[in-house]
Amino acid sequence: MALESVTANATEALPEANGSFITGSNGTFYEYDHDEYDEFSAVPSPLFRFVVQGLLLTLIGLFGLAGNIISIVILYRLNMRSSINCCLLGLTTFDLLVIITSALSFGLLEIGLYTNSISWYVNGLLEAMPTVFPLGIIARTGSIYLTLILTVERYVAVCLPFRFRSLVTYGRARILVMAAAVFSVLYNLPRFWEHYYEEHQRDGKKFFLIKPTALRQNYVYQQVYITWIYLIVQYLIPFLSLLILNSQIYLEVRAANQNIERLSRPQRKEIKLALMLLAVVTVFFLCNILPCVLNILEIASIAIHKLREISNLLVTINSSVNFVIYCTFSQRFRKDFLELFRYCCGRQGLELVSGSSPVSYEAARNGRPTEIVMVSVRSEPRLARLLDQNDADDNTL
């Protein structure tokens, strides 16, 4: 989940909170006592956790939440009969789920624990954590493999352009997105039976614990599923595939840029989309290298707790910044975003939308060339044909 290392923080009921549980990327829970903390401890201080996972993660998550919602709205406004739009919509949806589960599990929880507030939320979340945690990992897995599917789509478009239309279709893209979602759920299904919530009494105080089930404590399950399969499925396969495919895409883009004046408009658009993907994947690698390293270290029984908090923050950043990348590389995305912004501010701009939606255009009818006339595409065959000709360019970012 933005949950590469979930902070379950199963603590005493507020305001008497005294201890915490941290879970690593392999799901192991570590307990520590706030009263016994010192600055040289490998376990992060409450203040460090509050700043990194409480404040920074929550603020970045709020930005990412807004950005991904806007991206979904814009992608739905575009013609969805496009393979890349379908892949981007799937990726954005999974990133949105990553941010939501991350903010709920880390941000608000750390704020509540540090400030001794919203105890109702903290206790409620601890009770729901055995369910929230698997949902976060499902979203994270889906985000990783949608990034890989998007890379494959761009690889075929850039490196195998003459076979693109036959190999990559909207229908196949939709099947791949649904397959990634189903795989993410099925692969992480055992996570729902790894932990359970329990209420305890200690020294006259009531506190709540998230405890491992017999399945989670099984040695074979830990070694095979939690450790090695997780490393292979969540990191090795997607990382190596992304590295190989994007290296080929980069070489093709660099060669194409040397002869950019000879490229047609559609070819230039494919190159621009490939550059956008390279930016997405670069951010993906930068934000996921640390979680990958931590997972490998945990296999060697080396736990660096402070880095887990930073790892959670990086994964949240990865799911939050794609909106910025889309705005940077796609003029169409920027245009639709500005139109949406003006609409939300009560300044509805003019739109050119295919289908039966009204289309505005400046007409020189009745000697008044500045008059704005609202017409329907269906009532203007010439305009409809013009839109059909532009559909190929306008239905993607």
Image (cartoon, rainbow, N blue to C red):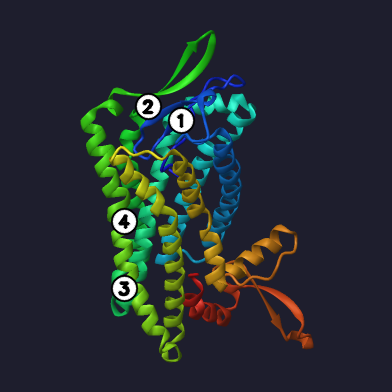
Disc 1 to disc 3, how far (Cα)? 42 Å
Nearer-the-camera pick, 139 or 82: 139
> Label 4: which residue?
238
Which amino acid type is marked by label 2? His
Dot 1, crowdedness within 10 Å: few (<14), some or many (≥20)? many
**Residue 186 found in image quarter:** top left
Q: Nearer the viewer, residue 121 or 42?
A: 42
Residue kind at label 1, given as amino acid type: Met
Any part of residue 390 in sight: yes
Q: CA distance from mark 2 to mark 3?
A: 43 Å
**Of 115 and 83, the residue lying toward us:** 115
Query: In the depicted view, which residue is nearer to us: 353 or 283?
Result: 283
- Residue shown at 36% from the left, 84% from the top: 255
Give residue 384's position: percent from left, percent from top. 54, 77
Q: Is residue 195 above or below residue 152?
A: above
Name the spot of residue 31 as percent of width and height, x first: 43, 26
Sooner in the amino-acid sequence: mark 1 or mark 3 = 1
Disc 4 crowd rating (10 Å Cα; few below 14, some 14-19, many 20+) is some
Question: Which residue is labeled 1 in the image?
Answer: 129
| C-alpha distance separating marks 4 and 2 | 27 Å
Tell me if label 4 and label 2 are in contact, CB under 8 Å.
no
Secondary structure category for the residue under label 3: helix
Q: CA–CA distance between discs 3 and 4?
A: 16 Å
Residue linked to disc 3: 248
Position of residue 152 relative to residue 314, above or below, is: below
Instruction: Identify the residue at image location x=39%, y=84%.
Output: 256
Residue 297 relative to residue 382: left or right = left
The residue that disc 2 covers is 195
Query: Which residue is found at the position 53% from the left and 65% from the top?
Result: 326
Q: How many marks?
A: 4
